[in-house]
Structures are given as C-alpha cells and as structure tokens.
Image (cartoon, rainbow, N blue to C red):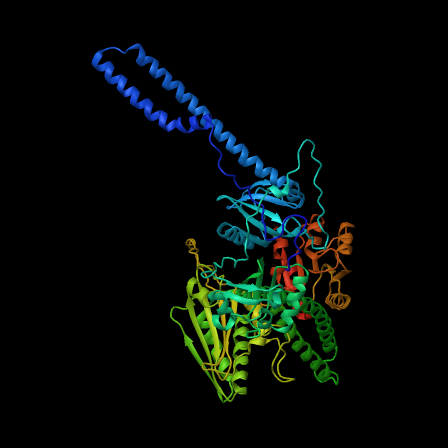
Amino acid sequence: MSSSPAQTSTQTPTQSPVQKPTAAAAPKNLLERLRDFASPAALTVVAIIVICACAAFWFIAGELPVGVVLTILVIVMGAVVSVALFAFSNDEETETRGPGVTALVEALAEPAAIASFDGRLNATNPAWRDAGGNEKRLPGGEGSAALFVAMREARAQGSSRALVRLGSFDFEMLLARLGDEQVLVRAASPGVLGTGLLLNHELPATEGMEPVVETEVVAPAVSPVTPAFDGSDAPFGQALLEGDALLTAKITRINPVFARLMGVSVAELTGKVWGDLIDAASREEAQAKLDAKKTAFEVKLLSNKDLPLQVRLAHTAGGFMLYLFDISEQKQLEQSLAQVQKMQAIGQFAGGVAHDLNNLLTGLKLRVEDLLHNHPLGDPSYGGLNEIRQISTRAEDLVRKLLAFSRKQTVKRVTLNLGELISESEVLLRRLMREDVKLETEYGRDLPDIHADKGQMEMAVMNLVVNARDAVHSSGGGRVKIRSAALTQAEAVAQGWADAPAQGAALIEVSDNGPGIPPEIMTKVFEPFFTTKPLGEGTGLGLATVYGIVNQADGHIAITSVVAPDEGHGATFKIFLPIKVHVAKPDAPKVEAAAASPPKVTPKDMSGAGRILFVEDEEIVRGIAARLLRQRGYEVTEASDGEEALDIIQSGDKFDLLISDVIMPGLDGPSMLKKARPFLGNVPVMFISGYAEAEFSDLLEDEVGVSFLPKPLDIKTLAERVKAQLAA
C-alpha cells in the first residue's frame, strides 16, 4: 500500500516531537543542597551509628545523659524531614514528566498516543480515540507485525514509521522514542476508509487551557537511516526495498528464506527490481491491490509460477519492508476442501437423478412384465418385449452405480475376511485379464475381518483391476497387482488415511506399471462420467462407483501415481476399511434341538386378499403396481402423496397393509406414518424407495412392523412381499 502524503502543517515526517531538552544547570538553592545532603540513606547510616554509640555508653555507664537523648530526637526529626523532601521531589518530578507528555499528545491535531514498547497505551488524544482506537493496547491484526518491527527500529535508532490500521482507518504512523520505556506514535497521513472517506477530526474547544507552542518541542535531527533488518533467522522471506513504488523498488537486502523461495542466490537478487521478478498477471493484480490500499496479496514468480506465495509489506523510510510467505499447504487444503464439496454436490445430483430413473424403470419393468404375461414364449411379440426387459436391466445396473457413488445404495453388510474376499474375487479377475497383462496377488499375514457389503466390495475391486488392466494394455502390456494387508492406526495414517480408527485398517491395494495418471486429471478421476478412454469405451462410472462404495463402508481411498517415463511409473489405488472389532458375547443357554422343520418355500400362488393403501407420487409407478395387485385379488386404494394418504386414513378407512414411497413432495413417507400410526394401529408398513434404507432408518426408530423394498420393483418380488406381510 502506498503511503499517503504526510501532513505539512506541523512537523515534517522526518521529525518527531520529543521532550524539551533540559537547559543549562542553574546554581542549586539551599533547599536543593539540603535535600542532596539529607538523603534518607545518609541519615539512616548516621542514626544507626548514634544509636549503637548510645547503647554502648548506656551499657558501660548505666545511664544516658540528657544531651544524648536530645541528639537522638534531632536525628529522628531530621529523618522525617528528609523523607518528606524526597517524596515531595518525586511528586514534583512525576508531575513535570507525566502530565507534560499527556498535554503534548492532547494538543496534537492528528491521532497520537504514548505507548510502552510492550504495546500498552499510556496516553491517547481525542483524534486517536475518534478513529477507533479505544483499546488499551496498540492495534493488532493486519499490519501489527510491521508496527512492532517499527517500534524496535524506533527504540534502536530514535524514529521509524509503519502503516497501521486504526479502527476502520489506515494511517501512516511516525514513531519517535521518548526515553528508554516509551514511544510516541502519531499519524503522518490522513486516515482513509476502504471507501476513500477521509477521517475529519476536530479538536474540542478547551476552556482555561493555554495552547502548547509547538516550537518549544524540539525534535532531534534525524538523518535517513536504513531500517533494522532482523529477519536473518526468520522462517519466512524478508527483503528491504528502496523506491517510491513497490513494483519499481529495488531489492537492497534479503534473508536466506527469501532467496530460497525465489530460487536464486542472494547476490543475484540484490539490486533487482521487485516487479521484474513476478509475472505480468501478478503485477497487474498487485497494482490493483495497492491501489485499493491492500498490504497483503498473492503473487506468482516468473521463475516458478506453480509456487503460491503471499506478500505482506510495511512502509519504511525511503522504501518498503517486504515479507514473503509460502502458502502451498494452505492452497492444498483449500483445493481439497473444494474437491470434497464438489464431490458432495455431484453425489447429491447423481442421487437425485438415480431416484428419478428408478421410478421410470419401475414403471417400465412392471409394464413389460405385464405384457410378457399376456404374450408368453412363442408369441410374435415375446422377442421384442424380452429385449426391452434386458435393456431395462442394463439401465438398472447404471442406476445402481449412480446410487453407489452418491452413497445411497441399499447395502447388506456382513462380516467378511479380507483374505477370503480377495481370493474368491481372484478367480473371476483372472478371466478378465488380457494376454499381455499379468495379474499378481500378495496376501499379508493375519488378515482381519471387515464389515461391508460383499457384492459392493467385489465390484469395487473389479473396477479398479479392470481400469488398471486397460491402462497397462494401452502402454504395451505389463502387470496388475492386488495386495492385501492389516495396518495399525499409525501405519494407515502414514499411508494416506488421516482419520484411521484406533483398531487399525484393512488395506486393499491395486497397483500397475502402466503410464500413470497425470497430475492435472488426478482430482477428476472420481467424478461421474469422467473417462480418458476413447469414445464408446467405458461409462466413466467405474471409479465413481468405487469412491461411493468405499465411503459408504466408512472407509477411505487414496491414489498415488508416477507418470511414465519416470522410474517406477504406474498408478496405485489404496482402499482402507475399518477392521471389524469382535465383541465377546455371553454363552447362550443350551436348548435341546427341536424337530427339524421343513424349509420355508416361497408360495407359487401370488394371489391373495386384503385391503392395501398404495402411496406413490410417481403416477406411472402407482398406476401399474396398483393394477397388477388388483389382478391378483387385492383391493387397492391409491394416494398421490402423504397428505392425501393421511386424509384417507383419518377418514376412518381400514387397511391391512400400507405401501408407501419414502421421498415425496410435501409430507414424506416416514412423517406421514408417524401422524397416521394412531389411526392405523398395528397395520404392517412397507416402504419402497430407490435410496438406501439407512438414509431414513433413523426416522423410524420407534416403529415396529416396518419393512423395506428397494426400487426398481418387479411384480414377482412385490407380490411375494405383499403376501408375506399379510400372512405375518
């Protein structure tokens, strides 16, 4: 930020008001000589000698003469007078030292304050308080570092200056040392708000006070000096620049960190123009920040445009003190946060799309099955209808992948041994390999159990292996390796899972020696429909599905890559999953084995009887499902949303089963059930949804007799579940 012009109506910026120098010593009067002679220390020594002498005389002679007693009284009176003179002299000195400086500050028109070198404010004037400086310490926040650097310079050299934010105003402050313990801080430029509004302070009229003549305050002659440069051991870059404008100022001194960040030696940087070391875009942005009175902004170097740097500056006599900070870690955190938010947004979008597709597929499947029932095998229309059913099955698989990515897929978690999971998948994976790609497996010792959906984990491993196979094949062949291991918490953190649980993690690592993943697309690989394969090869949902499956299993996935032709090129995907903690259960009492009951056989007859309330906002799903259930003997009442269903139930109609969608406009399924339960009694409830049951199970904690059927529906499964619910 460029400094504002200094005020010229008072002192010049290179002058700082200090105490008035003491005149030549005048002859001391009698009181002063007496005070110097009768010091408390001297009288104390004399009193001790006299008392000791009297005690010795009394001990030898056995009595004290009257003269000795009078002498003791005179000495005591002299001590009292001496103490009074000493206290009076101290009060006089304090009075001449304290209020005089305070009056000086009060008389200044610009904001001014007297501060200790530790930052405490001892006195401020109305202009300082009017600008917003009502604190008991010097301003903190942006620019405070430059202020305290300037205070050290003022303490060492007598004067300095710095750019300070006081309240909502920016000031160029002049600092002048007052003795060994205090510093005078006063504004040398008008305070400017961010909107460009000047601070106009008028001193209040003071009656009975004579104005302080400014010429009586003599400032010492200050020659331009180089500010103290104390950043040699600082963990950030520091440079001293000379010039009127930052971008044209020349570098005169730098510390080692500054040279390291710039990527050149100290000798090469000395004498260079700062603006010539940053790229053109950064120069324009920096100038815009300076014009807006900003003292902190980011720059990019000509020599290393990929290194993010932040500049902070403070004004000095004849130039600037520039501080340079490496903000690479901060930028990485910001990018990671943005990527997480982006993936969450895409996941929500994918889940919404999958939900709508599920409704459409449910209607399509129910309608096709109805037509196939009327056009059996041998009918001319059977072939075409069967092809439509196969297409809907492929679309259903696509929706399942979208739901897996958005972590809203219905899961059935079971306890799996990591070694058994990989060994069972290995048989199928070897059949998927090409002739020029070799599959290798490495099993660690004492592989742990995990708690996950077996089908989903097999799909995740298969997707990673198929992606690695295609990458290796495109580069002329090579190998794909699957490694499994048990990791402690510390090992998992070291390998990329910062939030690894205390019990440790199970690792599934899929690596290859293919061309690797370029850094520019590393952050995009988990996005749905993103693919680097040629048109027509792949849907771009493979890795997105893996990402969703791992996150839904409370795990983590990490990527490392080395791009060819570097040594060790290839990509490595690491899946971390929490280790299943087995809790010992008390032994159950032994029960004599009862006679073996015959296995439950699903009834072939799908017909039944009963009154069903079918609640679904998608008309095509509701209409077809209700019609098919009516064909099988059920009496079905339809409702298009939760409010309509609640009105029907509250009207007094009795039902044997309630079938309801979960996500509906207005009143959703679980909320509708809570309001309708007093009228329904113990009637069983079946929820149907394209989302996972876990998405809404917490809304049904106190409910009993509730089951779940995932979409897309088929008439066989729906009829079986309805008959089982009514039979129960």
**Dividing the image into 4 quarters, which one contains the C terminus?**
bottom right
| Camera-nearest residue between 251 and 625 | 251
Image quarter for residue 717? Answer: bottom right
Image: 480 above or below 325: below
> In the image, is 507 to the left or to the right of 711?
left
| Camera-nearest residue between 14 and 492 | 14
Residue, far front: 27
Asked if residue 410 shows in the view, the reply is no
Please give the name of the residue rendered at 67% of the width and 50% of the height, measured from the top-left corner: 168
The x and y percentages for residue 599 are 54, 66
| Camera-nearest residue between 707 and 444 | 444
The x and y percentages for residue 299 are 60, 68
| Camera-nearest residue between 309 and 476 | 309
> In the image, is 530 to the left or to the right of 643?
left
**Dividing the image into 4 quarters, which one contains the N terminus?**
bottom right
Image: 432 above or below 285: below
The total of numbered circles placed on residues is 0
Please give the name of the residue rendered at 66% of the width and 33% of the height, measured from the top-left corner: 209
The x and y percentages for residue 598 are 53, 65
> In the image, is 445 to the left or to the right of 290?
left
Image quarter for residue 383? Answer: bottom right
Image: 194 above or below 564: above
Image quarter for residue 301? Answer: bottom right
Residue, far left: 60
The x and y percentages for residue 378 are 71, 85
Image: 208 above or below 425: above
Asked if residue 619 shows in the view, the reply is yes
